[in-house]
Amino acid sequence: MIRDLEWLVALAEYGHVTDTAAILGTNQPTLSRALARMEAELGTRVFERAADGIHVTPVGEIVVAAARDLTDRYEQLLRDLETILDPETGVVRLAFLDSIATSVIPAVLRSVRAEAPRVRVELRQEPGHHIIRDLDSGAVDLAILSGKPPGEFGWHPLQEDRLVLIVPPGHPFATRKSIRLDELTGEQFVMTPVGFGFRRLVDGLLREAGVVPDVSFESQDLATIEGLVAVGLGVAVVPEPSAGSSGSVSVPIAAEGARRTIGLTWRSDRKISSPAARFREIVGNSWT
């Protein structure tokens, strides 16, 4: 269809079927058939044939103007796509967890910038269950989150965080060298909301220890959780990098599974864009 429109514009510009066919690299019968087909589809004559060539009809002026606009827009689309999809200059849509916004993400982006400085990364900071939804829908290309999602997802681990218990200063556990999770029965917890990946991780650890948490506060933000614990509003299990910034005291947890793995993930059942593949390659080489 685009080719036919381009031929229509060329016919209007050159005014001769034979000359236009030569310029376009086709032959006169092929171009004439294409013109006849277009006029039949449009239900009107675009050109009048004359001894000195072809002339655009009044209605044809409207058709040619529209054809020129459409072909110009198509060429712009191709240029835009080339820019967006170029592995060295394109766009990567990356989602990531709130809890790693100030740790893993800056380091990952720094490594990508060093290798592909012209790639533009559109960042989306959101909870884990929203990240999975956006990967499924194609709203994002790649994501950095905790734990490989179930299903058809690729996975490249980036770092492992030890989980610790944080308590306010002066809490009976504050001087402990380590703590068993089954010792936390009766404590009030500050946690992420139900449905968050980190909440599922912590709930699973407590369940294995036989602890049903008494939740006093919930927050999507681990920094907020740490701040609430620091002023005495409960205890919390958090990744070790999130501990202590507001004055909470961290206590190592004596449990083999008290850790989380942060990694890069993508849908493995579909092809990702060239810029996203370049991003993944750089991260894979930089984080081994």
Image (cartoon, rainbow, N blue to C red):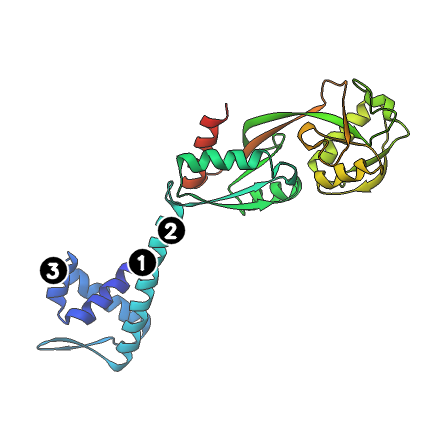
Task: Report x, y in % for residue 68.
Answer: 29, 68
Image check: 114 left or right of 105? left
* Badge 1 element: helix
Is there any visible trace of residue 192 in the rendered image? no
Give the residue number, with chain letter if any, for mark 2.
81
Q: Give the alpha-carbon distance from disc 2 to disc 3, as whole Å.
A: 30 Å
Residue drawn at (65%, 37%), measured in percent from left and top? Answer: 99
Q: Is residue 114 above or below residue 91?
A: above
Give the residue number, with chain letter if any, for mark 1.
75
Image check: 175 left or right of 78? right
Q: Residues within 10 Å of mark 2 (few under 14, many from 20)?
A: few
Q: Is residue 93 above or below residue 241?
A: below
Q: Which image quarter: residue 217? A: top right
Q: Residues within 10 Å of mark 1 (few under 14, many from 20)?
A: few
Residue drawn at (25%, 75%), measured in percent from left and top? Answer: 46
Q: Give the alpha-carbon distance from disc 1 to disc 3, as whole Å.
A: 22 Å
Q: Give the alpha-carbon distance from disc 2 to disc 1, as whole Å.
A: 10 Å
Task: Report x, y in % for residue 275.
Answer: 42, 41
Residue drawn at (50%, 26%), measured in percent from left and top? Answer: 287
Residue drawn at (32%, 68%), measured in percent from left and top? Answer: 69
Residue type (three-letter) at the residue carrying disc 3: Ala
Which label sits on residue 266? Answer: none
Task: Report x, y in % for residue 197.
Answer: 69, 36
Among the two numbered marks 1 and 3 on one chain, the one whose residue lies closer to the N terminus: 3
Among the two numbered marks 2 and 1 on one chain, the one whose residue lies closer to the N terminus: 1
Give the residue number, with chain letter if any, for mark 3.
22
In front here: 47 or 281? 281
